[in-house]
Image (cartoon, rainbow, N blue to C red):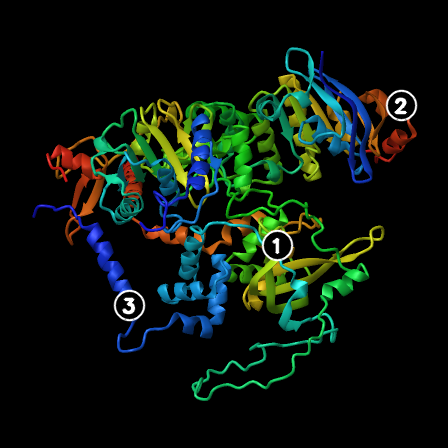
């Protein structure tokens, strides 16, 4: 049942302990939020879990179907294949992840093509279907994202990521750069898609509200360490650690 | 009329070369330039051809300039091609520019210093007025006693107070890489970068150096010291086992003092840029030191934003012989590829038209 | 030629180039860096091809040099003259008689045989260069077979033009592993790369890379199942020999713009007309 596991991760930047003995595990179809303030190490943790950065000590384990195995023995080619199709990574700034001078269809089709898709018509149909799924008019398939709004760009990134049917998705502040009015709709979209597709996800956010809306479980990070973890509602309704209490109490009531 | 395929490329080439040779000789009523005249009176051109040709031989460079009809990049190409045929006997010892007998030595960071500010044979302060009477009267410079004054390096003064980062801090201790014997690879260590710059096109380095001053990777440059003079070349013949001097070469060296690094925790120090080239070439040495410093951005923790800081960009495009080869190759026939483009564009236009009907 | 080694390059250099060639042959389509020498011809004008030929040329070889398919275009004349001078090489214009064929921008129409070597002059060995100008980044893409961006480019062209617009230097997959530039040959010539009995060597002097296709290597031009690769040629017949299947040069015949088409491969055309030179 465990899909992804981190054991005793340490990572230093100079004298700064970005990760100081972090362990966690994620089950299939489960959504885990990593919550903390900026500087807590949550983005570093996400990057290490996703194989985009390596830890100085400790390991990340992933079950490809034959039991948990450490990422470190996979080799770069295998890891990239994983990241290309079975995993997804949604960045806070979609402009970093998308090719702005490639059409929406081309952006969505890229992961498919990188994984061997070779039928132009099928790629187009799939891309159009995904535009609909993220509530973008499929008539915009051949438009350049250069002219899309921030919310549309994020929807496009989501489509371009989920198109390969990944089983595990990493998200780094997926609504962080968006207007408040747009955030709610994107969160709704993400929640719907993740449930419908049965994805497992690790989500980094500084926003407790986002964690409450999307996550089954959460971990609270402070200065490179996990200070509390558990079921989302339990931790947020009854925080034990004083730092968690501070975080929860500082959220303005809506 | 029946089409006759064009032939005779060989004859055309020979005729073209003969005509070019006639043009090179110029008006036969005028005396032919002597190689010695070029070596003696067009020294700046000779220095540039030696630097970019990568070979110190003023007479050879002068011949190349004559053969190339004054085209300095073409002349450097001739020198490079000749250099490639020479046997490589032994590597010389590193030259000691501190032991140079400078004919020119200036520092922009101190008003006065041991050994003094010596202008040497410079045209820096001339007024740029075309002289129509040039050579009417032989020039005569005032003579002075050679002072024999010691000229310590400015960088040693700053270094003694630990105000300046030490020289060659990243030296690995092994033999330096030779770009002419190994293909360029990235990341490129500093010895490779400096070698590429020393052989690099003066114009390209000038523009890049200029760009840093205008804000594209600005690094607060000050000329710590600029020296021009002769240094001895020494080597250790395997048969002898000790060093012998085999001659002198003229070099221009620029030590640039740049933006300091450091913080409250680590004491701040000035950083360095370095330029070194054959002959008397202020512009090249200074520009080279600006670009050298810019390319150290990653090592010094600076954000890489400007072209001069992009090591792959600078090193891939600074060799003017490679550059001119590829730029000028566009003159070669490309009609086969163009034919493919023609057929493609015709087909696309036809499809568009059929679609419209 | 006084004072120069056979075929100009010294033996150490030839050995270095041959080592690179062996590595290249062992990994079809993969670019091997080599210490390209300064040659007496400008880089960008065939120095890579010349170095490869010089490294493999022996006293018994018969050399053919073509540019744009013809033996007497100026650069082919110059290069053939270079080898005649520096190696006293026997030269020919007949494809079937050559043991080594150095070429720029074409593959001969006459099918190559086992035992022949074709040396391509390559300006840009990196097929990804228009998408990714950094060679260091491109090298990583090759290492992890990250070729999505190239397929996206083809997708975009079909979306924009209704067809793939690439007409020369059309990228191929070598041995189903490495994306490769076949050199700026017209797309029409790409099928000749596939399963050729000849050894195919590619030399890029200025960019300092050698790569190779050993005989009978599978070479596939990139395409989509529903937009298959289509090698194009002018819809015309050679005005001199009547060939319907060869690649044609378009000649502007008069001031009114009248056109005629002639075989690009001069040896093929001459042979069909019963002429030998």
Tell me: residue B303, above or below residue A153: below
Quick check: can you spot residue B348?
A: no
Indicate the quadrant where residue B244 lies: bottom right
Q: Say whether mark 3 and mark 1 are on the same chain.
A: yes
Residue tagged 3: B23
Q: Residue at x 81, y 53 (%)?
A: B263
Residue tagged 1: B93
- Nearer to us: label 2 or label 1: 1
User: Regarding mark 3 in the picture, which secondary structure is present there?
Assistant: helix
| Numbered label attached to residue A238 | 2
Indicate the quadrant where residue B115 lies: bottom right
**Subunit under mark 3:** B
For the C terminus of chain C, the quadrant is top left
Counting labels gives 3
Badge 1, how many Cα within 10 Å: few under 14, some, many 20+? some
Across and down, in percent, residue B31 comes to: 31, 77
**B256 on left or right of C255:** right
**C265 on left or right of B65:** left
**Subunit under mark 2:** A
Q: From mark 1 to mark 3, how far is it between C-alphas?
A: 43 Å
Q: Nearer the viewer, residue C39 or B343?
A: C39
Mark with earlier residue (1, 3): 3
Q: From mark 3 to mark 2, how far is it between C-alphas?
A: 94 Å
Q: Say whether mark 2 and mark 3 are on the same chain.
A: no
């Amino acid at each position: 049942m465990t899909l992804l596991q981190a054991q005793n991760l340490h990572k230093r930047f100079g004298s700064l302990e970005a990760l100081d003995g972090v362990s966690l595990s994620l089950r299939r179809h489960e959504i885990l939020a990593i919550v903390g303030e900026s500087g807590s190490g949550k983005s570093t943790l996400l990057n290490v879990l996703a194989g985009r950065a390596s830890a100085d000590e400790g390991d990340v384990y992933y079950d490809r179907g034959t039991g948990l195995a450490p990422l470190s023995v996979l080799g770069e080619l295998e890891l990239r294949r994983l990241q290309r199709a079975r995993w997804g990574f949604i960045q806070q700034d979609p402009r970093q992840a998308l090719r702005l001078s490639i059409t929406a269809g081309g952006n969505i089709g890229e992961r498919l093509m990188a994984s061997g898709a070779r039928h132009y018509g099928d790629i187009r149909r799939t891309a159009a279907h995904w535009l609909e799924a993220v509530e973008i008019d499929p008539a915009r398939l051949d438009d350049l994202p250069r002219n899309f709004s921030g919310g549309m760009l994020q929807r496009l990134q989501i489509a371009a990521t989920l198109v390969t049917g990944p089983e595990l998705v990493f998200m780094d502040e997926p609504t962080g750069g968006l207007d408040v009015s747009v955030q709610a709709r994107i969160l709704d979209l993400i929640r719907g898609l993740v449930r419908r597709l049965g994805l497992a996800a690790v989500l980094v956010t500084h926003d407790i509200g986002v964690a409450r809306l999307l996550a089954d479980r959460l971990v609270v990070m402070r200065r490179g360490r996990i200070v509390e973890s558990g079921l989302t509602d339990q931790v947020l309704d009854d925080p034990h650690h004083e730092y968690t209490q501070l975080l929860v109490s500082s959220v303005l009531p809506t | 009329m029946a089409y006759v395929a064009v032939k005779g490329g060989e004859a055309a080439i020979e005729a073209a070369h003969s005509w070019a040779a006639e043009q090179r000789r110029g008006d036969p009523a005028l005396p032919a330039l002597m190689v010695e005249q070029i070596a003696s009176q067009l020294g700046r051109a000779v220095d540039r051809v030696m630097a970019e040709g990568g070979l110190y031989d003023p007479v050879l460079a002068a011949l190349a300039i004559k053969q190339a009809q004054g085209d300095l990049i073409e002349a450097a190409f001739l020198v490079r091609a000749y250099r490639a045929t020479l046997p490589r006997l032994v590597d010389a010892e590193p030259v000691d520019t501190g032991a140079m007998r400078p004919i020119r030595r200036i520092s922009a960071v101190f008003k006065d210093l041991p050994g003094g500010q010596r202008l040497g044979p410079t045209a820096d302060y001339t007024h740029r007025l075309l002289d129509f009477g040039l050579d009417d009267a032989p020039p005569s410079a005032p003579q002075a006693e050679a002072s024999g004054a010691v000229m310590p390096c400015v960088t040693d003064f700053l270094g003694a107070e630990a105000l300046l980062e030490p020289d060659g801090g990243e030296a690995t201790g092994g033999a330096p890489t030779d770009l002419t014997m190994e293909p360029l690879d990235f990341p490129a260590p500093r010895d490779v970068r400096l070698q590429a710059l020393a052989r690099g096109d003066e114009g390209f380095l000038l523009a890049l150096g200029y760009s840093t001053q205008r804000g594209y990777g600005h690094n607060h440059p000050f000329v710590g010291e600029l020296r021009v003079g002769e240094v001895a070349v020494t080597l250790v013949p395997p048969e002898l086992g000790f060093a012998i001097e085999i001659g002198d070469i003229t070099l221009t060296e620029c030590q640039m003092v740049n933006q300091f690094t450091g913080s409250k925790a680590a004491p701040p120090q000035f950083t360095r840029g370095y330029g070194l080239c054959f002959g008397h070439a202020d512009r090249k040495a200074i520009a080279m030191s600006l670009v050298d410093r810019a390319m150290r951005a990653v090592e010094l923790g600076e954000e890489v934003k400007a072209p001069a800081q992009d090591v792959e960009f600078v090193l891939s495009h600074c060799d003017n012989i490679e550059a001119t080869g590829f730029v000028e190759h566009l003159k070669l026939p490309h009609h086969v590829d163009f034919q493919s483009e023609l057929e493609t564009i015709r087909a696309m236009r036809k499809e568009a038209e059929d679609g419209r009907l | 030629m006084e004072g120069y080694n056979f075929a100009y390059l010294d033996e150490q250099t030839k050995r270095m180039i041959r080592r690179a060639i062996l590595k290249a042959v062992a990994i079809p389509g993969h670019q091997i860096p080599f210490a390209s020498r300064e040659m007496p011809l400008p880089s960008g004008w065939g120095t890579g091809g010349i170095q490869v030929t010089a490294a493999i040329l022996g006293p018994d070889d018969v050399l053919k040099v073509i540019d744009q398919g013809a033996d007497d275009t100026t650069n082919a004349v110059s290069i053939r003259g270079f080898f005649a001078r520096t190696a006293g090489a026997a030269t020919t214009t007949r494809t079937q008689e050559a043991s080594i064929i150095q070429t720029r921008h074409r593959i001969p129409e006459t099918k190559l045989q086992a035992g022949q070597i074709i040396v391509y002059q390559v300006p840009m060995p990196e097929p990804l260069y228009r998408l990714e100008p950094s060679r260091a980044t491109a090298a990583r893409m090759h290492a992890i077979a990250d070729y999505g961006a190239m397929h996206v480019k083809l997708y975009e062209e079909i979306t924009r033009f209704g067809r793939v617009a690439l007409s020369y230097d059309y990228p191929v997959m070598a041995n189903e592993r490495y994306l490769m530039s076949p050199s700026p040959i017209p797309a029409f010539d790409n099928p000749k790369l596939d399963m050729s009995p000849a050894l195919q060597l590619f030399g890029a002097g200025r960019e300092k890379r050698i790569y190779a296709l050993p005989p009978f290597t599978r070479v596939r031009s990139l395409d989509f199942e529903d937009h298959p690769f289509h090698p194009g040629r002018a819809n015309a017949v050679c005005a001199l020999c009547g060939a319907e299947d060869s690649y044609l040069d378009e000649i502007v015949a008069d001031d009114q713009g009248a056109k005629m088409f002639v075989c690009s491969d001069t040896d093929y055309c001459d042979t069909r007309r019963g002429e030998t030179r």
